[in-house]
Image (cartoon, helix red, strand yellow):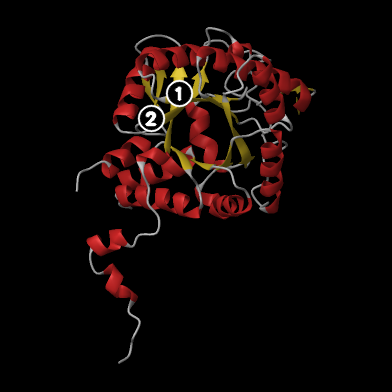
């Protein structure tokens, strides 16, 4: 009898769909970004990222407790300092906002795995990711500052550092600096394939990190390039990266898949601010089913090969995934 093969048999109801589902998403896969600012009792919503906030250390600790209660294992911290200068000195100060937040979170929720973004853009007056001279971002002088920042995070109690600057050789420089200071056990998650993307727009409001002049295309990757990502990832693994990241995620699922196929290391993907904000805006207008679109996007990132997903949707998705059957 025709047809013999009826794939619809295994789609008949939710029970059988779950039983044969190829890709599953869990709160264990999530890393939740937090934006730490100076002051006290500060909780300022980011206008372009509904549900996300700039928070002082005391408020970040409350957020971290909520994150952990939802079975999300990790957060990544971004800092908004009170003082900015040409060399981003607030990035590596002993009592910088991120350093203080690490200590406070570790005191309050010691089991939560704390990752820190290592970059200069939030801390420099010019908004670029490194030292600027003659209107050019200087690669090698920046490595020293990134290394100092990473070591300061490790001293404060971070579990992992995540360089996002895209300077050549920064993973090796940070690894050597950490090892020399006795932090051989601190892991590195490298933003290995980070593209010069328009999807970062809302983040630059959140982190107050927009460049004052020019753009970042001279050091972040060209969105048109696919094979180049494999070279970038290979360099970072050779230099000592423990986890590598593709950023953004949704527009670069092919790159995530390529990286997962080519390398036997954990792969992270950053579901970035623009991807989040587009869904939030369309959801508020009633143009899409926000919850279903969110879960479909997260599933697509996992299906492409990501082991870990940095996402502003983490808490919302975890609440759905944690619901009893």
Q: Nearer the viewer, residue 157 or 147?
A: 157
Residue 280: % across, % down: 36, 42
Determine contact: label 2, label 1, CB under 8 Å. Answer: yes
- Secondary element at tag 1: strand
Residue 219, picture quadrant: top right
* Figure check: 11 above or below 302: below
Q: Is residue 169 left or right of residue 17?
A: right
Q: Is residue 153 left or right of residue 9?
A: right
- Secondary element at tag 2: loop
* Figure check: 146 above or below 248: above
Identify which residue is drawn at 68% across, 48% down: 230
Q: Residues within 10 Å of mark 1 (few under 14, many from 20)?
A: many
Q: Which mark is residue 35?
A: 1
| CA separation in Å, label 2 and label 1 | 8 Å
Q: Which mark is residue 52?
A: 2
Identify which residue is drawn at 37% across, 51% down: 24
The residue sitting at the left extreme is 325
Identify which residue is drawn at 29% across, 28% down: 69
Residue 50: % across, % down: 36, 34
Residue 40: % across, % down: 38, 9
Residue 70: % across, % down: 30, 33
Q: Is residue 125 left or right of residue 20?
A: right
Is residue 313 something that shows in the picture?
no
In which quadrant is the N terminus drawn?
A: bottom left
Is residue 231 something that shows in the picture?
yes
The residue sitting at the bottom extreme is 1
Q: Nearer the viewer, residue 263 or 54?
A: 263
Q: Is residue 137 left or right of residue 246?
A: right
């Amino acid at each position: 009898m025709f047809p013999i093969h009826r794939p619809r048999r295994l789609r008949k109801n939710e029970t059988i769909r779950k039983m044969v589902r190829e890709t599953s998403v869990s709160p264990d896969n999530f890393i939740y970004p937090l934006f730490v600012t100076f002051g006290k009792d500060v909780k300022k919503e980011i206008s372009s990222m509904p549900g996300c906030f700039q928070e002082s250390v005391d408020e970040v600790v409350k957020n971290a407790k909520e994150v952990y209660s939802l079975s999300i294992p990790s957060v990544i911290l971004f800092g908004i300092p009170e003082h900015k200068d040409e060399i981003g000195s607030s990035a590596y100060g002993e009592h910088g906002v991120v350093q203080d937040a690490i200590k406070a979170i570790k005191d309050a929720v010691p089991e939560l795995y704390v990752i820190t973004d290592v970059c200069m853009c939030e801390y420099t007056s010019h908004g670029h990711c490194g030292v600027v001279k003659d209107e050019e971002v200087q690669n090698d002088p920046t490595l020293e500052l990134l290394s100092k920042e990473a070591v300061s995070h490790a001293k404060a109690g971070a579990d992992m550092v995540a360089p996002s600057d895209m300077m050549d050789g920064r993973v090796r420089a940070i690894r050597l600096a950490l090892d020399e200071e006795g932090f051989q056990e601190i892991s590195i998650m490298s933003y290995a394939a980070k593209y010069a993307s328009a999807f970062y727009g809302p983040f630059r409001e959140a982190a107050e990190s927009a460049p004052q002049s020019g753009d970042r295309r001279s050091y972040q990757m060209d969105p048109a390039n696919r094979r180049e990502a494999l070279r970038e990832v290979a360099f970072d693994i050779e230099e000592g990266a423990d986890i590598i990241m593709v950023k953004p995620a949704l527009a670069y699922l092919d790159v995530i898949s390529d990286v997962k196929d080519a390398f036997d290391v954990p792969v992270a993907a950053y579901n970035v601010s623009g991807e989040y904000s587009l869904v939030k805006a369309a959801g508020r207008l009633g143009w899409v089913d926000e919850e279903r679109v969110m879960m479909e996007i997260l599933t697509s990132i996992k299906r492409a090969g990501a082991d870990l997903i940095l996402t502003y949707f983490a808490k919302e998705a975890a609440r759905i995934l944690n619901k009893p059957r």
